[in-house]
Amino acid sequence: MARPLPVDPARFAATACVAYPPTRGNRHRTVFLDAGHGGLDPGSVGTTESGRAIYEATETLAVELAAKTLLTRAGFRVVVSRTTNSSVARLTAADVNGTLLTAKGVHADVAARDRCANRAGADALVGIYFDAGAPTNAGSVTGYDAVRPFAAQNLRLAELVQRDVLTAMNRRGWKIPNEGVQPDTALGSEISSAGVRYGHLLLLGPAESGWFDTPSQMPGALIEPLFITDPFEGSIAASATGQRVIAEGIAQAVEQFFSRSGRRA
């Protein structure tokens, strides 16, 4: 059986940007899965119903790896942004301030995920993140970019991911609210004025001179299936069952996307 291999070890962190070959059959398609945050960037901090603190980067990684296993079994080559609690980019001194990433470091680490997907020749991209807000905020949302040349495929992938993940969760009786599919201009938060002017999610958005020159080159969507700051939803996000159910929805959506899409756009 073929082993997982780093896509380009000279360009990415040691445990990042790793390609897994299909384990059953071969659909001759590559899927890129991004586990949001990681390393010095824990992402949002939430809590479970028992009061345990949970970190977005930990829960996204578990979902990503579970989805990777399902998709390789379904005949896909899968490239993951990270395999451990690490950054994706090879960070420099300018990217780090003590135990935190600088704004430059955050930008570099997200941009590295697009470069990984491009270097791997991915046919589709799915970002896996969790939402955060007031303890009463809840629900699943999926974002897509509406200004890319492949915007129609972005939207279709986002609709499939949102529908299949939400259906998989609510089949369990969890009653997760449907926040729908939204353009990426309505999602995310930026800490720099340049990022605010850009207005898109780096993982999905277009190039912009002087700010971002390595955009993803394939249809993509980004799901935030739960609010980890809601104790009920945070408990699901932190559970092996919840992570597996979300992964099953993602894998089903990817299979449906390729079964209907024909050749790559």
Image (cartoon, helix red, strand yellow):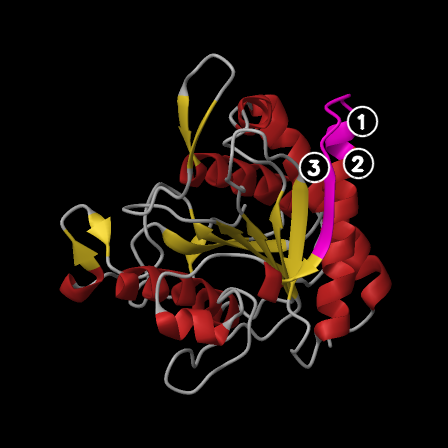
Identify which residue is drawn at 77% across, 21% down.
173
Q: Please, what is the three-letter code of the amino acid marked with disc 1?
A: Arg
- Residue at the image point whose x is 54% and y is 72% from the top: 216
- Cβ atoms at labels 2 and 1 below 8 Å apart: yes
Residue 103: x %, y % from top left:
29, 62
Dots 1, 3 in contact, CB < 8 A: no
Q: Is residue 55 left or right of residue 182?
A: left
Distance from Cα at disc 1 to Cα at disc 3? 12 Å
State whether residue 129 is above or below residue 262: above
Residue matched to label 1: 171
46 vs 80: above or below? above
Alpha carbons under labels 2 and 3: distance apart = 10 Å
Q: Which residues are magenta?
A: 168-181
Reading the image, the residue beneath label 2 is: 167
Q: Toward the viewer: 93 or 183?
A: 183
Q: Is 173 in the magenta?
A: yes
Which residue is tagged 3? 248
Q: Give the mark, 1 or 3, whose residue is nearer the N terminus.
A: 1
